[in-house]
Amino acid sequence: MSVPPARARAIRTALAAVVLGTVALAPPAAAGGVTSSAPPPGAVPVAGAVSGATGAASLAGTVTVGRRRPTARRTTDVHVLAFNDFHGTLEPGTANVYGRFAGGAAPLAGLLHDRQEAYRGRATTVSAGDLVGASPLANALFHEEPAVVAANLMGVELSAVGNHEFGKGTAELQRLQRGGCHPQDGCTGAPYARATGRPAGTYPGADFRYLTANVLTGGSRTLFPAGAVKSYRTGSGTRVRVGFVGATLREAPTVVSPSGVSGLTFTDEAEAANRTVRSLRRQGAGVNVLLLHQGMDQISPASPDSCNAIVAGSALEGIAQRLDPSVKVIVTGHTHAEYRCTTTAGGTERLVTGAASNGRVLSDIALTLEDRTGAFVAAGARNTIVENALNAYGSGVPRQADASKEDPRVRSLVEQYVSASGPLAGRIVGRVRGDLTRVQNATGESALGDVVADAQLAATAAPDRGAARVALLNPGGIRADLLASDVSAAGEATGEVTYGEAFAVQPFGNSLVTKTLTGEQIRALLEQQFAGCRGQGTTRILQVSHTLRYRRSVEPLPAAPTGARCAAAIGEIDLDGAPVVDTGSYRVTMNSFLACGGDGFTVLTQGVDPLGGSQDVDALTGALEAAEPDGIAVPEPGRILPLRR
């Protein structure tokens, strides 16, 4: 990619200006319930947490935890600026939150830099994981490197590791951290140069530090440092220290291809965090922040600061209840939800924040500390929408870009990658006759899931390509909708689908695999969709091709021994109009993630005679091309039917 010298110099200067700050890395570590929108008895009322000592902008309206009475000693506020699940979303695009166009690298960088400047050295910018992975084409085409370089320019200092960071394996994740060219493609996404002595055109790596307290490479050694300590100068001239711990959801191996986490052990998040906290305490950190790639879901939130979260029995609740009292804030991710909640466990109150995804929300967390001792006084948080347009969001309403909200250096960087990927991203591959969405009906079927499953069946039905009779797809394998009204690409007409839009639906680079399963195994697989059945931890309803039709329970499973309850979840199963026979053999197509038992579907590992195929996105674009000139219609539901007892 050719870059004008002036622009290259500007990028080098910007990259050189991003530094980690005064951070002491902790040595590797071995491996309260959350309230809903109504605060718990005795909780701190809604109020601002920022004192006047630093002159920082007030966070009026924040939920705070800490002392009810003001301290007589001088205090200083330090800020944690947090986001999560960015997923390499470089462009602003048309994503929205609460009726506002939001997200993208340059708008997020603009807001971050405004806050960083306002807090004058008393702010640390962090990510709670999935900074990369499942990315749009402009980032994925260059091996996730653009998102890391953009994060450098944003001033990100520390990050948890999300499950998607493991998508291409440990060695590739370590390369993203330390720098160097891709082993197969080299450095294809220049400019990378910065004032570090590395030659121009070399990917520089991350200026921020990944933290993995609970991800072990063997024995007690963590993949990356377990934690870090950040030092801040107070208004009195003294220094206070805050510890940061990074943790990945323990269940990551169930949602990542086995090859991506080969050789790694994922331990209990709370236990690993507590061990790390003890190490950070020896370095002077009496107050700690947990960067956790695990979170909660929201129920019809009214604002980015709502806390209508699904809490009881959640993994996050179990972690929060067992944390060391010095952990005062939990910055979460993974669920793509935005919230600002409090926790109470063992007499310790904590803040829990989530910042949606794709750079659409920024959490601004203020920690009030005593100047002399660094002791915790209070913590407050507020979520801000990262707006990227002059106008409000509306169905079919084009976004009117607002350059004043964007950081110009990051915008320039993004423009180069978008331009380089443009010819491929903008190619029209087909048409849709209506909106194809991931929204599931009462039985778990979605229009887009139907279309993608049919596309994968069509790509593997020929005798020399697998002789498949049915295709199955995990719902998490679909990452974006195909909307007839989306005409964001230059010259794109209503209903047209670009390669970039198709890639956004399936950005993982999974290949198709066809295996032979018995009818008994197919029934066992469908039972395994339900939590508690055959080792499944979470209910996940597979999307199926038009050749399969079955009935499933849409009511709570009956109280009975596990085997009987799971068997009661599935009724009759038909394939091509005939009942599936337990002793019969059937060729079944799936993506490579599922073929390895991903998402807990271990029954699929029992399949035999595997045959590899094309990439999943190629199957989708092939189906779009085959449907020309009319385009793909919105399918009628009816493949998964309710089972009435």
Image: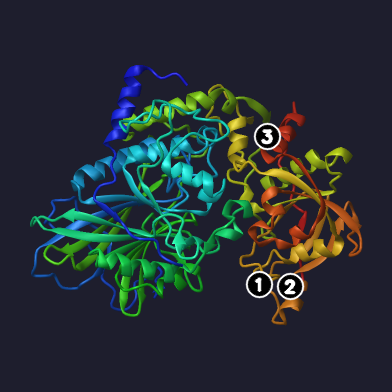
Q: Disc 3 on helix, strand or loop? A: loop
Q: To which residue does mark 3 refer?
A: 432
**Residue 151 placement: quadrant:** top left
Say which of marks 2 and 3 sits in front: 2
- Which of the two labelled residues, at mark 2 and mark 3, occupies the earlier sequence position? 3
Residue 73, position in %: x, y?
9, 67
Q: Residue furthest front?
A: 219
Mark 3 or mark 1, whichever is nearer to me: 1
Look at mark 2 in the image and give the residue it sits on.
566
> Dot 3, how many residues are within 10 Å of its Cα: few (below 14), some (14-19), or many (20+)?
many
Q: Amino acid at mark 1?
A: Gly
Residue 624: give x, y in percent of width and height. Answer: 71, 33
Is residue 458 at least partly visible in the picture?
Answer: yes
**Residue 330 at x, y = what percent?**
37, 63
Residue type for callout 2: Cys
Say whether residue 432 is left or right of residue 370: right
Asked whether, in this view, residue 462 is left or right of residue 270, the answer is right
In the image, what residue type sits under mark 3?
Answer: Val
Q: Mark 1 and mark 2: span between their CA atoms?
A: 8 Å
